[in-house]
Image (cartoon, rainbow, N blue to C red):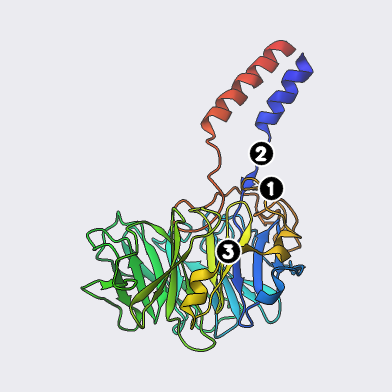
Amino acid sequence: MHSFLTLVTLSFLAPRAARATACVAMDINWNLFAFGLDGKDWNAGTQDQWASGTATEITASGRPPFDGTATQCFLSQFTNAIYVIDGDKANPSNIHIYDATANSWSTQTTTAGNLDPSSANIILDHDTNFFYAVLNGELFDLDMGLLKSANSSALPWNDIEATPYGSSYKPTMALAQNHIHFLDVPNTPTGEANIFVIHFSFFQPNPQAYPSNGQTVLPAQHGKTASFFQAAGVQQEFVYIPDDGSNTYVINVETNTTQVLAGPTSKDPNAFYFAGITSLVQLDSTGSVSFLSYNQNDTSANAKAAWSPISALASVAPPSSSASASASGSSTGSASGPKSSSSSGSSSTSGSGSSSSASGAAAVAPRGILSVLAGALVLGTIALAL
């Protein structure tokens, strides 16, 4: 009896597993990378290899542990570098830089001030290579220069100004034509977006409508976004997937029109999205990765397109039935572990999927009940031992 209670007690006292977040991105050759998936990093190659190929592991030293609560990956097209925001829960203000040409990692420190990157909505502007973030109604920026590896000086997040949308607005932000588009803004007509002009640091006073065949189609709903790249130049279209996953909306800011495409198979409000030139990729909370083919010059083909799994990743990192856990380890070496997680990291920390801005797993279970049960069992064990 004593042994049974002791084992139960120890099971409650053991460290709770940390739930983690993976993310996906592409390089300038449109190879698909999955970071922190099954505790490792993968290169699935180009789109023609996704259905039948096998991803190659590229886990390298210096990588973040991918245990943040709102991990996001961004491509800097000018530098062929992938920037990771909130990849290390112990140091959420650090920006981890993956040099896709050299397959090497470095860590850029920042001074975040009043900004918590793990709670903010963030985009990376194409031409300026500035990050823009919104948190509690404040707009921040950070200049990445042309970094493809970190420098020794911390980069500052600057508090630019208050947005006109209030501190209670939960942003849905998208980038196209060096403009930040804000969807589902309070008191804005359904089907319209508010706009911040980056080059002039100016909030346009009037929203812009984006109809489909003259009809309002964009719902008044929070969601996720991604921007379709061009071979050269700024993005002209962005994708909006509402939290209910009902449809995939592609907004063209040149023509001010919207295409209504198939919604993702996985209706996951915490999914992470990345768009290249000819595809939109979804990574959901279970570690399942799928894509929607896209042709920027063929709306008829787009209307018929369906979401497909990326077998090249599923074959090496099968998705789990729920968001998986990661413990601790070293962030300076290769990692292995459960789905959508990392078992590496310079500190043993816990994380959860984003409930505010980005993809990932569900939140960690509340600790209060576990603490009470653990305490009761410890007392019971001591009493029996006596």
Identify whether 315 is placed above or below 234: above
Q: Which residue is drawn at 67% across and 57% down?
A: 346
In the picture, the quarter occupied by the C terminus is top right
- Left or right placement of residue 218 versus residue 77 in this view: left
Nearest to viewer (mark 1 / mark 3) = 3
Residue 319 is situated, as x and y percent measured from the top left of the image, at: 67, 53
Quarter of the view holding residue 292: bottom right
Q: Residue at x 53, y 61 (%)?
A: 272
Quarter of the view holding residue 313: bottom right
Q: Mark 2 points at which residue?
A: 15
Query: Earlier along the polypeptide chain: callout 2 or callout 3?
Result: 2
Label 1: which secondary element: loop
Query: Label 1, label 3: how many angstroms apart (C-alpha)?
Result: 33 Å
Quarter of the view holding residue 34: bottom right
In the picture, the quarter occupied by the N terminus is top right
In the picture, the disc for residue 307 is 3
Q: Is residue 158 visible?
A: no
Query: Label 2, label 3: how many angstroms apart (C-alpha)?
Result: 39 Å
Q: Name the residue under label 1.
A: 327
Crowdedness near tag 3: few (<14), some (14–19) or many (≥20) residues, C-alpha within 10 Å:
some
Residue nearer the viewer, 201 or 272? 272
Residue nearer the viewer, 277 or 70? 277
Crowdedness near tag 2: few (<14), some (14–19) or many (≥20) residues, C-alpha within 10 Å:
few
Residue 328 is situated, as x and y percent measured from the top left of the image, at: 69, 50
Residue 188 is situated, as x and y percent measured from the top left of the image, at: 24, 63
